[in-house]
Image (cartoon, rainbow, N blue to C red):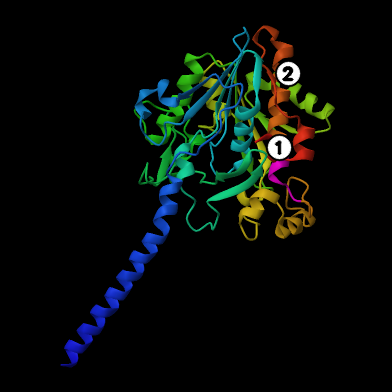
Amino acid sequence: MELNRQHLSNRNLNLVLLAIVVIVCLYVTPGYLAMRRPEALRKGPGVTRIAHLSEWFEGIKGTAGDTDVYILDSGKPGGSALILGGTHANEPAGYMAAILMLENAVPAQGRLYIIPHANASALTYTDPMEGVPREFTLQAASGKRVFRHGSRATSPMNQWPDPDIYVHASSGQQLSGSETRNLNRAYPGRADGNFTEMIAYAITSLIRKDSIDITIDLHEAAPEYPVINAIVAHERAMPTASGAILNLEIEGVVMGLEPSPASLRGLSHRELGDSTATLALLMESPNATQGRLRGRTDEALILTGKDSQYVRGQKLGRLFVPYDEKGWPLHLRVARHVGGLQAIFAAHAMTAPERAIVLGGVPTYDELATKRLEPFL
């Protein structure tokens, strides 16, 4: 009799636990499914065509890697540029700068390609155990805008398991196994590679087939990371990057210049510069949500960049950027990217006027720094 009572008690407990699991699943499923829906962006006045990345490599057609490519064609002879946002979907200033460009830029010469979510798979989930929000909201001029906040790496739903050691295919360089899902360790990619390598291959194919003159990959990094508030340039892109740094200094914007290390493989500024004719560059802005010194990671930290722990870190000399109570707000980080893009295009026009990319409609650094992002979205 006692055994029967114990069995009944265990069964009831199991049913209660099962019911709790079902309730939790019902609660979280809508949010999970919402993360897997493509983010709706708005076509700006300069966009002449919206393509899919699979047009340049059919191997990713219909997958979570088949992201949108916005093409802004002036119809006038000139050069071509590709802006990559969202290589890492937890670096919002990069993809917000790309979104701002596609919603505002009107080309007067040449063509501009914009991929706001280069690794769209990484936008479908957040990093486990990191406690980061799934989205953030801006009260834009066009109404309330909700933007996704994702992960640094391809979703495990699209590529799993990670190997113990990731071997970069073309160089043989060995990295941590988790880097196998990092798009910025996968270039130039492989047509028959893993999911992330195929995304990299599709982007490389676009650059080759459409003869892209300049490729700029937009990123963010932790304030304690040494390469920050900087342009990283392949050696062939150094004259353009140097001219851009001077253009920014004239505007009162201090930006560092770093050479692309030949010994670090798989990165866009190295591999795209080596394997294609494009001038490959990367920009970094300071983002507290990326770092290990941060406190609570919430929507406010994404938007304001204010973190008391980083203020302490600055006072202790642990950071590579100034960091006070004002923080590094999102609009200022986006301003650095957008201002940097304009400075790069201006420098390129000076060295190769016949291949210039001239844009109108883009807010200046000062406009973004003072008016914030909202009026331009």
Identify residue for label 1: 375
Compared with 212, 148 (above or below) is below
Position of 148 with respect to 334 (left or right) is left
**Residue 174: horizontal and vertical position, in percent?**
46, 39
- Residues packed near mark 2 inside 10 Å, few (<14), some (14 to 19) or many (20 plus): many
- Please, what secondary structure does the residue beneath circle 1 have? helix
Q: What segment carries the magenta color?
A: 327-333
Q: CA distance from mark 2 to mark 1?
A: 28 Å
Residue 4 within the segment the image draws in magenta: no
Q: Is residue 147 above or below residue 7?
A: above
- For disc 2, the marked residue is 347
Q: Dot 2: what SS?
A: helix
Q: Position of residue 88 (x, y in %)?
A: 54, 40
Residue at 72%, 54% in the rendered image? 306
Between residues 9 and 255, which one lies in front from this camera angle? 9
Name the residue at 69% across, 48% down: 223
